[in-house]
Amino acid sequence: MQTCPDCGKESPDRFGLCGYCGSVLAVLAPSREARKTVTVVLCNLKGSAELAGRLDSEALREVLTLYFSAMKSVLERHGGTIEKYSGDVIMAIFGLPRLHEDDALRAVRAATQMRVALAELNATLRARHGVILQNRTGIGTGEVVTGEGGPHRLATGSAVNAAGRLEQAAPPGGILIGETTYRLVRDAVEVVPAVPLDLEGKPEAVPAYRLVSVTADTRSARPAGLPLVGRARELAALGAEFRRASRGTRTGRTSCSGACGRPWRNWPGAGRSWWSSTISTGQSRPSSISSRASSVPRSGSRSCLSARPATNSARTGHASPRGSRRRPRSSSGSSPMKSAAW
């Protein structure tokens, strides 16, 4: 089986393209270490030894299979990757193989949905076997070292240790999150402060929070109106291009390029939504902004923002690779493409 470098799913060896996302499958190189900031969810089934004493082997196997299947489904639906099963423990990582800016929020959402899924599963288990399951969950965010580029991605680091300690301190049915995770999701969750924890290697007790609920309609934990640090020049250029397009009848197009190790089908986290909302805020004349990502093979990835007056229907085109002599196409009434490197 081949592992897709983009989505992390497995496809048969004879496949040239990923059966899930369509990315090109390359021969796996030996795993190399990489340092990443991820969010770890560690969930432990409470009273598994007691459960084994009450049920025969076949019934116990059925109960555990249903439990792990239900938890795995929730974690993967929210973008988590199952790192390992260890006895009655599930560890999932949000941020591997692909990082998202809202990995911490995805993790806490998954944890709350796991609680709901377990309640639904318990109705079935009570009717079939007369048992009710309970678990406890810890969520930690931090740096880990993981294998990259190979089939094995064993993650080790502070986030794994923190999640394990938080899980141990959580009450049955409870979810404890660490200080770093809380800072990332505090605008989207309701928590209750818990007793600070003593973690190995930390000189002082570390704050912990018991997760009560997650805001249902919040798409991102990032508060509105936050400034982008160190991009004043780029923001001024984009604002000027937007105002020029809004005052006239021509479409303004600006591309942002950045280096990457391989061609990307998309450029997640490039900030197109942030730029679009920021430069359009406070503009009086009706206009529209669209964003697009395109890949430039072997050179990097490019993100394109297009601004046009509401009455203008000019068609926008793709950006040309940096250094190319060919000028970007422009339809009648559209301005040349402006490019900025990140």
Image (tube, rainbow, N blue to C red):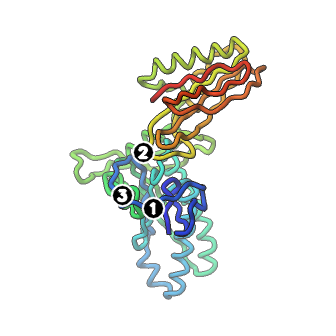
In which quadrant of the rendered image does the C terminus lie? top left
Residue found 22% across the figure and 51% down from its top: 201
Question: Looking at the rendered structure, which numbered label has been put on residue 313?
Answer: none
Point out which mark residue 27 bears.
1
Kindly identify the residue that appears in the image at 63 percent across and 14 percent down: 243
Residue 256: image location, x then y, percent: 52, 30
Question: Quick check: 73 left or right of 46?
Answer: right
**Left or right of 330: which side holds 279?**
left
Instruction: Give the structural element (helix, strand or loop) at label 3.
Output: strand
Q: From mark 3 to mark 2, how far is it between C-alphas?
A: 23 Å
- Amino acid beneath label 3: Gly
Residue 334 visible somewhere in the drawing: yes
Which label was assigned to residue 181? 2
Could you say which is closer to the camera, residue 9 or residue 316? 316
What residue is at 64 percent from the left and 13 percent from the top?
A: 244
> Mark 2 or mark 3, which is nearer the start of the sequence?
3
Residue 1, position as x, y percentages in the image:
50, 69
Q: Quadrant of residue 16?
A: bottom right
Instruction: Please state which of residues 54 and 23 is positioned toward the viewer in this rendering.
Output: 23
Please say if 146 is above or below 53: above
Dot 2 surroundings within 10 Å: few (below 14), some, or many (20 or more)? Answer: many
Closer to the eye: label 1 or 3 = 1
SS label for mark 1: loop
**Chain-order first, disc 1 or disc 3:** 1
Q: Position of residue 133 (x, y in %)?
A: 52, 71
Which residue lies under the disc numbered 3? Answer: 147
